[in-house]
Image: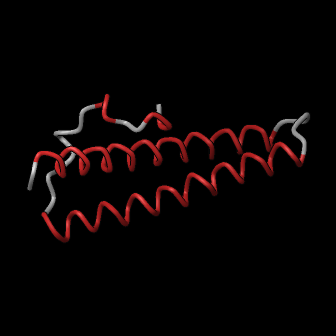
């Protein structure tokens, strides 16, 4: 695999991990806000929408990850550079 494709595969792996972490954090926030007395339905709906949008992006990146694996094999996650996260994931 070329260095260019390897770099992009690493970024996809990093993005998958980032989206998984973000979804877990949003789920925790949803649980906390749902138990709160001052949480509005609009706030909970917005958090749910945010989670849904992140889940859709995660699904897309997982599909890209699988495409890379099918063509080039698995390089593993040990080579992921934390600075390779897309700007939107930081």
**Image x and y of residue 29, in percent:** 67, 38
Q: Residue 50: image x %, image y %?
A: 67, 48
Residue depicted at x 80% and y 51%: 45
Q: Is residue 44 left or right of residue 40?
A: left
The residue depicted at 31 percent of the width and 28 percent of the height is 83
**Along the viewing direction, whichever of 49 and 40 lies nearer the viewer:** 49
Q: Quadrant of residue 86?
A: top left
For the N terminus, the quadrant is bottom left
Above or below, 59 against 6 in this view is below
Who's the residue at 40% across and 58% down the image?
61
Residue 52 spot, x, y in % from top left: 63, 57
Q: Is residue 90 above or below residue 66?
A: above
Residue 1 relative to residue 6: left or right: left
Query: In the image shown, does 83 or 31 lie closer to the viewer?
Result: 83
Query: So how many labels did they put on this image?
Result: 0
Quadrant in which residue 32 is drawn: top right
Q: Which residue lies furthest to the bottom in this view?
A: 70
Q: Where is residue 44 in the image (x, y as percent from the top left)?
A: 80, 47
Q: Which residue is drawn at 45% across and 34% down?
A: 87
In the displayed structure image, the side of residue 1 where residue 87 appears, left or right:
right
């Amino acid at each position: 695999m070329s260095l260019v494709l390897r770099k992009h595969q690493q970024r996809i792996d990093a993005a998958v991990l980032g989206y998984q972490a973000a979804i877990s954090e949003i789920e925790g926030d949803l649980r906390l806000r749902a138990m709160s007395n001052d949480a509005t339905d609009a706030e909970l709906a917005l958090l749910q929408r945010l989670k849904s949008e992140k889940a859709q992006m995660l699904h897309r990146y997982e599909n890209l990850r699988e495409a890379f694996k099918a063509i080039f094999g698995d390089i593993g996650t040990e080579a992921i550079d934390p600075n390779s996260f897309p700007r939107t994931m930081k």
